[in-house]
């Protein structure tokens, strides 16, 4: 398995059109994505490894940096 270092900005839609099941599906997809990145970078227990970082940006009518690269 090849481990890679990456910096990722995960951009999530929080607009009104995401209420209900679209929001639930987005949350599930975001968690799955983070789990895949954690595994790909050699992280454990949902932690991203190999010096990689992830930040979260959400948007509706404006964008918000919810977390910086951590």
Image (cartoon, rainbow, N blue to C red):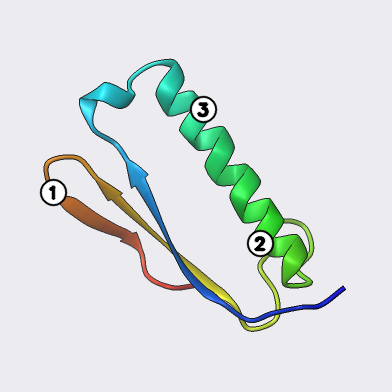
N-terminal-most mark, 3 or 1: 3
Local crowd size for mark 3, using a 10 Å CA cut-off: few (<14), some (14–19), many (≥20): few
Q: Which image quadrant for residue 14?
A: top left
Q: Position of residue 57 (x, y in %)?
A: 33, 56
Residue where numbered disc 3 is placed: 25
- Residue at position x 70%, y 55% in the image: 36
Is mark 3 in CB contact (under 8 Å) with mark 2? no
Q: Distance from label 3 to label 1 (Cα)?
A: 22 Å
- Residue at position x 69%, y 52% in the image: 35
Residue where numbered disc 2 is placed: 37
N-terminal-most mark, 3 or 2: 3
Quarter of the figure with the N terminus? bottom right
Say whether residue 8 is left or right of residue 47.
left
Q: Position of residue 2 (x, y in %)?
A: 81, 77
Local crowd size for mark 1, using a 10 Å CA cut-off: few (<14), some (14–19), many (≥20): few
N-terminal-most mark, 1 or 2: 2
Residue where numbered disc 1 is placed: 62
Is mark 3 in CB contact (under 8 Å) with mark 1? no
- Residue at position x 74%, y 66% in the image: 40
Q: Where is residue 47 in the image (x, y as percent from the top left)?
A: 68, 64
> Residue most toward the right?
1
Q: Which image quadrant for residue 13?
A: top left
Considering the numbered disc 2 on the image, is that residue within a helix, a strand or a loop?
helix
Considering the numbered disc 3 on the image, is that residue within a helix, a strand or a loop?
helix
Local crowd size for mark 2, using a 10 Å CA cut-off: few (<14), some (14–19), many (≥20): many
- Residue at position x 49%, y 25% in the image: 24
């Amino acid at each position: 398995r090849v481990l890679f270092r990456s910096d990722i900005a995960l951009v999530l839609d929080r607009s009104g059109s995401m209420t209900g099941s679209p929001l639930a599906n987005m949350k599930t997809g975001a968690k799955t994505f983070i789990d895949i990145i954690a595994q790909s970078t050699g992280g454990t227990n949902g932690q991203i490894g190999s010096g990689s970082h992830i930040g979260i940006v959400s948007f509706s009518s404006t964008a918000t940096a919810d977390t910086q690269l951590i």
